[in-house]
Image (cartoon, rainbow, N blue to C red):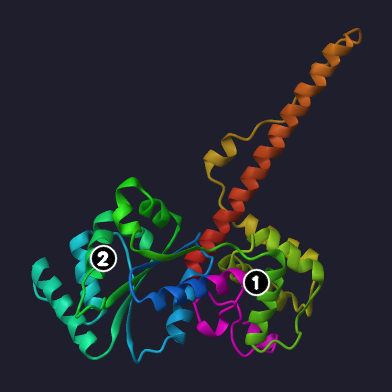
Amino acid sequence: MYNKFYNLTKKPFQLNADPDFFFGSKIHSRALAYMNYGLTQGEGFVVVTGEPGLGKTMLVRQLVHNLNTENIVIGVMVTSHVDSDETIKIVAATFGIRYEGDDKTTTLEQIKDYFIDQVQQGKRVLLIVDEAQHLPKGALEELRMLADFVVDGIIPFQVFLVGQKELAQTLYSPDMDQFRQRIVATFQLKALTEEETKVYILFRLEKAGWNHKPEFEDAVFQDIFIFTEGIPRKINTFCDRLLLYGYLEELEIFKPSDIEKVVKEILEEVPQPAAQTENITSPIDFSDQLPIDSSLAERVRYLENNLTSLQNIVNKERALLRKAILIQLDMEDVFNKD
């Protein structure tokens, strides 16, 4: 809707992980460097973790986009909750390996034959597992055994695990020591800084043909950073909503007041669960005043108690507001996700 109004050639803040919109922030460039380093090792596991919305899938697509596929066969596997036997079948299906029935042993032999065939062609096999936090320990163990397979002194199979922080918790549990010994590189993604948030927004706009319409006052970027916490997916969701607002209001310049209005709109759309409203502390009743002849110590204690109560109310209200913001952004992620 707003593309024509702002003379944009494409949607700048789409949620789809398009490599053309890859933003090489300091943290994302470093993560990509770790992934490429892992590739040069030609064996073992590379692990990348991070909170939802930080750009893990974009990293995967950028890596695949830049790889020379003449000597690497790449398979991308997006997991749900699967057991170890299902994992073997999914690996086979990912690389187009035909298997019949439920015989795990036969499927494993077919996968190994595939590895041998690729080595003979001068190629190796890379499996990238997205949403890897869903893999149970048994499934990870199956991948470990596949990664231990050797053909004529060559390890043909390497695995990249990309997932949320729960993946790291699984890998660093006491009984996963044997698996951890095969990790050649690991990296944890973090959010963008305030300055990177501004550069990120302008970068995506320019990729979409932006010619300084609309304009942005400098203070706008700080407000967006505070609201989105520098998380790329949340930035995309919010900025998409902001441009829609600008189109409807026919704005050619965005000011902090516009950010405030869009934030208010989003918060008003957030359903308030009963559990969140029942526990709100009622205002302090100051009608019960101390007698005039109270001692100084009693008055100090009285003021300290009321100040503590006020601070508790502020903290609770602040926590509720933060929850409301996060709930709304998560809801928008669900409705807008491909």
Give the residue displayed 87% in from the left and 10% down from the top.
291
Disc 1 + disc 2, Cβ < 8 Å: no
Which residue in the protein does label 1 denote? 239
Q: Label 1 to label 2, Cα distance in Å?
A: 40 Å
Under mark 2, the amino acid is: Leu
- For mark 1, give the secondary structure: helix
Label 1 crowd bin: few (<14), some (14–19), many (20+), radius 10 Å: many
Under mark 1, the amino acid is: Cys
How many labels were placed on the picture?
2
Q: Is residue 24 visible?
A: yes
Q: Is residue 80 left or right of residue 55?
A: left
Q: Is residue 255 visible?
A: no
Tell me which segment is drawn in magenta: 1-30
In the image, residue 11 sits, relative to residue 77, either above or below, namely below
Which residue in the protein does label 2 denote? 143
Q: Position of residue 124 (x, y in %)?
A: 29, 82
In the image, residue 126 sits, relative to residue 334, either above or below, namely below
Which quarter shows the N terminus?
bottom right
Q: Position of residue 233 (x, y in %)?
A: 56, 68
Give the residue displayed 61% in from the left and 81% down from the top.
12
Q: Nearer the viewer, mark 1 or mark 2?
A: 2
Q: Nearer the viewer, residue 163 or 178?
A: 178
Indicate which disc, 1 or 2, sits on the residue closer to the N terminus. 2
Give the residue displayed 34% in from the left and 59% down from the top.
181
Q: Is residue 181 left or right of residue 283?
A: left
Q: Nearer the viewer, residue 284 or 74?
A: 74
